[in-house]
């Protein structure tokens, strides 16, 4: 009988089924537990992703920790989650990292003494915006009155400034405002600072530095050894509507590294037409004020109150040309040929205030030489990585082509013949913003 019992095969399946029931239930139920764990992880991850994206926005004003937790409230078991949120923040950069975890209490795997499975998620989001350093170079020569350019320039320039200094961009956008006629008035106090304590002014009517032919190359001139523009006019004496001076007076002096939209727009409104077209001087100063070699000067301007107030957030500007977080731009608007540079006949003459000097003058640089200086400044500015836009207003084709050579790309050179200066400036502003976003 015993041998018959050992050889019998009936009833094996129920016995095997009974023996395998627990491990089979554990495998099937364990798979259900694992699927549920993954479902909870995905839900937690999605909620965490949305939370850090919202928290990392540069426009976000809420504290990141409660904000991220508010998004996690949408996820199952969120009340049981342990949440950690960290933030890195600068003026134009914000990075938020968050992690969340909780234990999922198993249903089937507890049969194998696995009572809980961890559910974890980590997410990071950041938003950054390029620093913008911009030199805005505006021709205020007398011809800007004759051809209606001044009337178009003012609304166009103000709208341009409003576009580049929007609330969401002004904190990391600085503007050097550089009007030019025959020269560039850098402001009395800045002029005196650069000249040094022993510098002897010719006069106090305006503040334009002379430049040597060797100054229109890369580098900063030694200002203490540079002369001051005499106070004179060549074309504009007693001309209605025009200021007579080759070097503009204080109302048209430079504004440094500003993001004060109201002040800059007021400066635009205050512009008057002066004498001469010293485009090379305007471009030289435009490059200098984007050049990191001028950082000490900007610090002195800010610390000593030598000109307009410079925001403390710009204390590390001008940035190095190799700084990947900074874009540098020059926008030049002019309405004429690059002019020659006359001076009173006697080099010792400091002021001529009662006549044009046409019959009693000498020439420092002919127009073609000054045009060559313009080309040199444009070339090295572009080599430094500065992006240049040009707007030529009501000029003939050869003049427009000469101005356009300075632009970084042919599409960045505008020739404006009619009532569309505003459209040109807005196109520049739009392109500038596109460059900022893509780079």
Image (cartoon, rainbow, N blue to C red):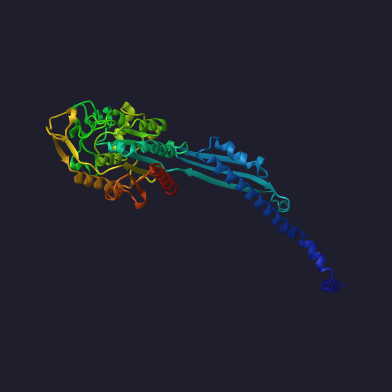
Check the picture and name the quadrant holding the N terminus: bottom right
Q: Residue at x 17, y 37 (%)?
A: 342
Q: Position of residue 310 (x, y in %)?
A: 36, 31
- Let me know if residue 380 appears in the view: yes
271 horizontally vs 68: left or right: left
Q: Looking at the picture, tell me which residue is in the foreground, 172 or 415.
A: 415
Q: Quadrant of residue 325?
A: top left
Q: Quadrant of residue 71?
A: top right
Q: Looking at the picture, tell me which residue is in the foreground, 361 or 115.
A: 361
Q: Residue at x 80, y 62 (%)?
A: 18
348 horizontally vs 5: left or right: left
In the image, residue 306 sits, relative to residue 393, either above or below, namely above
Q: Residue at x 73, y 50 (%)?
A: 107
In the image, residue 58 sits, relative to residue 230, either above or below, namely below
In the image, residue 262 sits, relative to residue 374, either above or below, namely above
137 horizontally vs 74: left or right: left
Q: Residue at x 13, y 33 (%)?
A: 347
Q: Position of residue 53 (x, y in %)?
A: 55, 44
Q: Position of residue 367 (x, y in %)?
A: 20, 44
Q: Position of residue 215 (x, y in %)?
A: 21, 41
Q: Looking at the picture, tell me which residue is in the foreground, 72 or 344.
A: 344
Give the farthest residue toward the right. Answer: 1
- Let me know if residue 199 appears in the view: no
């Amino acid at each position: 009988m015993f041998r018959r019992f050992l050889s019998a095969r009936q009833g094996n399946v129920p016995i095997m089924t009974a023996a395998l029931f627990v491990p089979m239930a554990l495998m099937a139920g364990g798979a259900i537990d694992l699927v549920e764990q993954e479902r909870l992880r995905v839900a937690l991850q999605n909620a965490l992703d949305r939370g850090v994206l919202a928290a990392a926005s540069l426009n976000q004003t809420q504290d990141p920790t409660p904000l991220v937790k508010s998004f996690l409230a949408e996820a199952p078991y969120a009340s049981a989650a342990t949440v950690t949120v960290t933030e890195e923040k600068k003026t134009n950069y914000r990075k938020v990292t968050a992690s969340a975890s909780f234990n999922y209490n198993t249903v089937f795997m507890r049969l194998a003494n696995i009572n809980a499975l961890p559910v974890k998620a980590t997410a990071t989001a950041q938003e950054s915006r390029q620093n913008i350093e911009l030199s805005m170079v505006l021709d205020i020569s007398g011809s800007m009155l004759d051809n209606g350019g001044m009337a178009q320039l003012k609304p166009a320039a103000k709208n341009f400034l409003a576009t580049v200094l929007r609330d969401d961009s002004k904190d990391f956008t600085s503007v050097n405002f550089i009007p030019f006629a025959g020269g560039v008035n850098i402001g009395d106090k800045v002029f005196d600072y650069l000249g040094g304590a022993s510098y002897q002014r010719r006069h106090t009517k305006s503040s334009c530095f002379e430049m040597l032919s060797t100054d229109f190359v890369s580098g900063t001139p030694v200002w203490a050894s540079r002369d001051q523009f005499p106070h004179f006019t060549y074309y504009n004496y007693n001309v209605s509507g025009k200021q007579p001076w080759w070097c503009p007076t204080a109302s048209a002096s430079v504004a440094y590294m500003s993001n004060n939209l109201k002040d800059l727009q007021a400066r635009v409104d205050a512009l008057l037409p002066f004498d001469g077209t010293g485009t090379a001087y305007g471009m030289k100063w435009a490059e200098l004020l984007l050049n990191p070699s001028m950082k000490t000067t900007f610090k002195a301007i800010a610390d000593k109150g030598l000109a307009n107030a410079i925001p403390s957030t710009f204390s590390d500007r001008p940035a190095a040309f190799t700084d990947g977080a900074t874009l540098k731009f020059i926008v030049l608007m002019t309405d004429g040929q690059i002019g020659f540079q006359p001076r009173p006949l006697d080099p010792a003459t400091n002021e001529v205030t009662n006549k044009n000097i046409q019959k009693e003058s000498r020439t420092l640089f002919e127009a073609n030489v000054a045009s060559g200086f313009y080309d040199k400044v444009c070339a090295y500015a572009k080599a430094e990585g500065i992006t240049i836009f040009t707007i030529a207003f009501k000029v003939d084709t050869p003049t427009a082509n000469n101005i356009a050579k300075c632009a970084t790309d042919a599409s960045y050179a505008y020739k404006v013949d009619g009532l569309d200066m505003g459209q040109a400036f807005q196109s520049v502003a739009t392109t500038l913003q596109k460059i900022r976003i893509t780079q």
